[in-house]
């Protein structure tokens, strides 16, 4: 049976998160074996700030996606699981999950990343290392980002952030990339954001 996610997407897009939770639960009641509604519920709970309830749901979806042999190489929902663990104070688990993703992108077991070729995971891992003054994690993240900047897709966002962290571009160049050339300084970027 093909489920209709239009109402769920509408509620999520319009920041009606409680309604999105209710719609996700309704979709679950229609097909208890479809992971789509579980993913919708996890996203809704995340948006509501109910991290403790969202985390195991993302875990279910992650397991299902990564074991799906029809689309091998999916990264699952580990990026969300890592970030939620970080928010909940589980820094070690968060770094472990993010490191597994960077390893998977390098060894090819994860074939799908962001438009820049898996840069987002390295940027988040770098943030984690810097935030807790973990030099080993920071170095690991920078080493990983060095493997990503060699690829042509690095020009796509968030690739310029990696180039900035590695000292290849300056902050104004980063702002220009983030605003698609419409701003080259902080004041201009603020105007573009408005």
Image (spheres, rainbow, N blue to C red):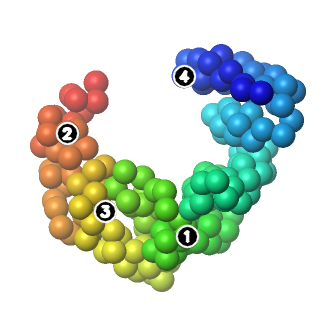
Q: Do the numbered discs 1 and 2 sit on residues whose CB atoms are within 8 Å? A: no
- Percent across and percent down for residue 93 are 67, 68
In the picture, measured across the screen, residue 23 lies left or right of residue 110, that is: right
Q: Residue at x 38, y 59 (%)?
A: 117
Q: Against 12, is 124 above or below?
A: below
* 3D distance between C-alphas at marks 2 and 3: 16 Å
Mark 3, other Cα within 10 Å: few <14 / some 14–19 / many ≥20: many
Q: Residue at x 65, y 37 (%)?
A: 43
Residue 164 seen by the camera: no
Which residue position is annotated with label 3? 162
- Percent across and percent down for residue 186 are 19, 41
The image quadrant where one finds the N terminus is top right
- Percent across and percent down for residue 134 are 50, 77
* 3D distance between C-alphas at marks 3 and 1: 22 Å
Which residue position is annotated with label 4? 13
* 3D distance between C-alphas at marks 2 and 4: 24 Å
| Mark closer to the chain start, 1 or 2 | 1
Q: Do the numbered discs 3 and 4 sit on residues whose CB atoms are within 8 Å? A: no
| Mark closer to the chain start, 2 or 4 | 4
Q: Against 146, is 175 above or below?
A: above
Answer with the quarter of the image where residue 144 lies. bottom left
* 3D distance between C-alphas at marks 1 and 2: 32 Å
Q: Do the numbered discs 3 and 1 sit on residues whose CB atoms are within 8 Å? A: no
Q: Residue at x 12, y 43 (%)?
A: 184
**Secondary structure at numbered mark 1:** loop
| Mark closer to the chain start, 3 or 4 | 4
Mark 1, other Cα within 10 Å: few <14 / some 14–19 / many ≥20: some
**Residue nearest the observer in this picture, 125 or 154:** 154
In the picture, measured across the screen, residue 115 lies left or right of residue 29, that is: left
* 3D distance between C-alphas at marks 3 and 4: 29 Å
- On residue 109, which mark appears? 1
- On residue 180, which mark appears? 2
């Amino acid at each position: 049976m093909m489920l209709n996610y239009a109402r769920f997407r509408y509620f999520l897009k319009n920041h009606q998160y409680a309604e999105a939770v209710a719609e996700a639960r309704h979709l679950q009641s229609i097909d208890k074996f479809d992971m789509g509604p579980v993913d919708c519920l996890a996203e809704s709970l995340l948006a509501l700030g109910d991290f403790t309830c969202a985390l195991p749901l993302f875990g279910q979806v992650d397991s299902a996606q990564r074991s799906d042999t029809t689309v091998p190489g999916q990264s699952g929902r580990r990026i969300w699981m890592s970030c939620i663990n970080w928010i909940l104070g589980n820094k070690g688990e968060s770094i472990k999950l993010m490191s597994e993703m960077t390893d998977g992108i390098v060894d090819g077991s994860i074939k799908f990343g962001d438009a820049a070729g898996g840069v987002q995971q390295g940027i988040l891992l770098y943030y984690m290392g810097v935030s807790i003054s973990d030099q080993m994690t920071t170095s690991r993240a920078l080493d990983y980002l060095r493997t990503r900047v060699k690829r042509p897709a690095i020009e796509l966002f968030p690739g310029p952030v990696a180039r900035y962290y590695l000292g290849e571009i300056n902050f104004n160049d980063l702002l220009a990339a983030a605003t698609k050339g419409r701003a080259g300084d902080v004041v201009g970027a603020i105007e573009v954001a408005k």
